[in-house]
């Protein structure tokens, strides 16, 4: 629900960020680790703000392989191109802040599926798409998707630990090829969201410089609560907000 003078706020959250809450999956993968589906984002930085439980986030980047512990009060963030895997350590609960709200839900995330899946857009879409809803069929599909992503991820991690960044680099290139056709739509979302928010601040600074704070007459406040609880996200069960530019439904329920 949203309260205010209009049904939907004309302005996004501060900085046009995306917002959701995650409870990390507790399904064990083939390596015995419980957690989410490894993936990367192409143009968005993501942050975890830990609000409960324990766990970790595993990352692959030009820095190599890292595992950062997560506990209440800790914050971890990763820039575009960083493969990340949320690991459940017990009751892990995370608030997720996403740069460029709207872009992640429009496809700015690619799972670490094996190369043969990444090379076939149709096969990739079939593997990445979940049935609608939150029932047993969706849960089973989410687990299969996670397991397939872990399969590809473990190969990338093993090579990177051994000093070979070739598979990791090729995964980045394959991810870029998969999303190339989506970029014009992303540009529109960016202009309407993050860029518009920054330009609005610039206009306000200009107004203050000119001694005209008339825009302050538009001041108001909003409130909201999650409108979908327990959806199946990439890293875990996901609570979402149906606010413009905040947490739009994932494309094809991904």
Image (spheres, grey):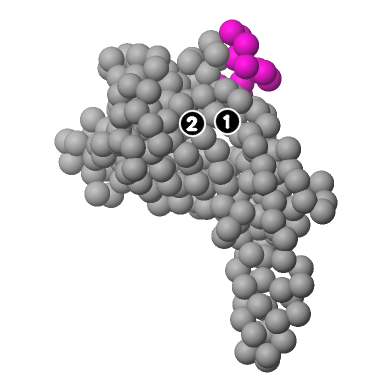
Disc 1 secondary structure class: strand
Would residue 185 be counted in the magenta stretch?
no
Count of marks placed on residues: 2
Closer to us: 151 or 45: 45
Q: Is residue 185 above or below residue 158?
A: below
The residue indicated by pointer 1 is 239
Which residue is at a point 44% across and 40% down the rendered structure image? Answer: 40
- Dot placed on the residue nearer the N-terminal end, 2 or 1: 2
Residue 94: x, y in percent?
43, 35
Which residue is at a point 72% across and 66% down the rendered structure image? Answer: 219
Q: Is residue 37 visible?
A: no
Q: Are marks 2 and 1 in contact (CB under 8 Å)?
A: yes
Disc 2 secondary structure class: strand
The residue indicated by pointer 2 is 22
Quarter that holds the N terminus: top right
Quarter that holds the C terminus: top right
Closer to us: 227 or 150: 227
Residue 84: x, y in percent?
37, 37
Q: Is residue 172 above or below residue 216?
A: above
Q: Is residue 210 visible?
A: yes
Determine the image quadrant of residue 69: top left
Residue 159: x, y in percent?
24, 34
**Are there few (<14), some (14-19), or many (20+) residues within 10 Å of tag 1?**
many
**Are there few (<14), some (14-19), or many (20+) residues within 10 Å of tag 2?**
many
Would residue 129 be counted in the magenta stretch?
yes
User: Magenta region: which residues?
Assistant: 123-138
Cα separation between marks 2 and 1: 7 Å
Which residue is at a point 56% across and 52% down the rendered structure image? Answer: 17
């Amino acid at each position: 629900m949203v309260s205010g003078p209009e049904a939907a706020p004309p302005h996004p959250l501060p900085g046009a960020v995306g917002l959701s809450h995650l409870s990390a999956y507790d399904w064990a993968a083939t390596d015995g680790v419980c957690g989410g589906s490894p993936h990367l984002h192409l143009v968005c930085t993501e942050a975890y703000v830990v609000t409960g439980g324990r766990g970790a986030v595993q990352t692959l980047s030009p820095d190599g392989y890292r595992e950062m512990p997560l506990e209440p009060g800790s914050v971890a963030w990763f820039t575009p191109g960083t493969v990340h895997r949320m690991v459940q350590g017990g009751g892990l609960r995370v608030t997720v802040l996403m740069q460029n709200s709207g872009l992640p839900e429009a496809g700015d995330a690619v799972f670490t599926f094996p190369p043969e899946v990444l090379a076939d857009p149709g096969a990739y879409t079939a593997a990445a798409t979940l049935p609608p809803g939150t029932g047993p069929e969706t849960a089973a599909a989410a687990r299969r998707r996670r397991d397939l992503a872990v399969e590809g991820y473990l190969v990338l991690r093993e090579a990177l630990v051994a000093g070979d960044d070739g598979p990791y680099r090729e995964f980045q290139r394959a991810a870029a090829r998969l999303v190339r056709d989506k970029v014009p739509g992303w540009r529109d979302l960016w202009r309407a969201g993050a860029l518009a928010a920054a330009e609005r601040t610039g206009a306000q600074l200009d107004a203050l410089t000119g001694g005209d704070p008339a825009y302050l007459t538009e001041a108001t406040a909003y409130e909201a609560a999650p409108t979908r609880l327990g959806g199946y996200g990439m890293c875990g069960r996901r609570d979402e907000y149906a606010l413009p530019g905040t947490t739009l439904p994932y494309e094809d329920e991904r």
